Amino acid sequence: MRRFLNLSDAGGDAVAAMLSDAIDRKTARAGWPKAKPDADAPLAGHVLAMVFEKNSTRTRASFDIAIRQLGGVPMIMDAGVTQLGRGETIADTARVLSRYADAIMIRTDDHAKAEELAEYASVPVINGLTDLSHPCQIVADLLTVVESGKALPGLELAWLGDGNNVLASLIEAAGLFGFHVRAGVPQGYEPEASFVEAARAKGSRIEVVRDAREAVAGADLVVTDTWVSMGQDHAHNKIAAMAPYQVDERLMAGAKKDAIFLHCLPAHRGDEVVDAVIDGAQSRVWDEAENRVHAQKSILLWALGKL
Ligand code: CP
Ligand code: NVA
């Protein structure tokens, strides 16, 4: 039984296959109505259950459209209106949803809950974001980088701000694809050590620096995210610590001339990024958001053994 709780559950070859499949499918349906199934409808008759214990716009909408484009149907389970929200166990929820759905996506606060769901489910489980990681986002990010004409091996990625779940999965991807990460983060907000160690063990250069200009120097790709993730305290001392890492035009100018800017969204304009950057010529954030659909399709196909 396949699971996609982290990128390493699939491994580099499978993620590369997802990227290639996503590009082929995206190209083949260019200009089509958005919910029209792909010509081969490879998941016709399949159901994707989506469990949301946290808010979502992109993950929710893109998985919904993705399963329809593959010929299947979505089933959304918002925790607040299900028995899960009243204390039914993850294990029992996993057993029951496995009888209704062919795959389960979960967005939750505690990564251990996604692991527990995968343990008790008899269908593939996909991580749609936990406190630890956000692997589906990073498949879309890699797709956006490849589409921009940049090769992944040897790429220099600069991260600014909070060492969060998105950075953890980017670091994991660095290890799988041989690129390097220089993270400009304040003291106390470093990325998850186990992800850093795993990527270094595969030969990637993963650096944590305190100076934002040092982080972006020579970067091919500049990435940031909200300073306060869902479920975290909006602490004033955290915001103050993050302020020097705001991505503005001056900071962006320190990266390579042809560097691109990514942000998983939602953005907090005026905090981690200014309008001139997110709306500027180097920004690829809307392609990145669209690519969530194309990436989810290939993740689903891999999870169901069709890739
Ligand atoms: N990037 C992302 O996962 O967005 P949502 O929180 O809107 O799903
Ligand atoms: N780091 C953010 C990502 C949102 C898509 C969060 O966890 O809230």
Image (spheres, rainbow, N blue to C red):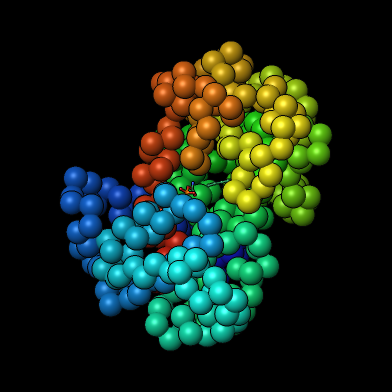
Closer to the camera in the image, 136 or 179: 136
Which residue lies at the image location 59% right of the left edge and 37% below the top edge?
226
Q: Position of residue 85 (x, y in %)?
A: 54, 70
**Residue shown at 76% from the left, 32% from the top:** 237
**Residue 86 x/y as whole percent:** 56, 74
x, y (%) of residue 76? 39, 67
- Viewer can see residue 238: yes
25 or 116, which is in the foreground?
A: 116
- Please identify the quarter of the rendering in which residue 245 is found: top right
Q: Is residue 35 above or below residue 168?
A: below
Question: Eyeballing the image, is 11 above or below 234?
Answer: below
189 relative to 104 in the view: left or right: right
Q: Residue at 58% across / 27% down in the picture?
A: 271
Which residue occupies the foreground of this view, 299 or 231? 231
Considering only vertical position in the picture, is 141 above or below 297? above
Residue 118 visible to an observer of this rendering: no
In the image, 39: left or right of 175?
left
The quadrant of the image that shows the C terminus is bottom left
Residue at image location 51% in from the left, 77% down from the top:
83
Relative horizontal placement of residue 239, taking residue 60 as reference (left or right): right
Count of marks, rendered view:
0
Q: Nearer the viewer, residue 187 or 28?
A: 187
Image location of residue 265, percent across then percent down: 48, 40
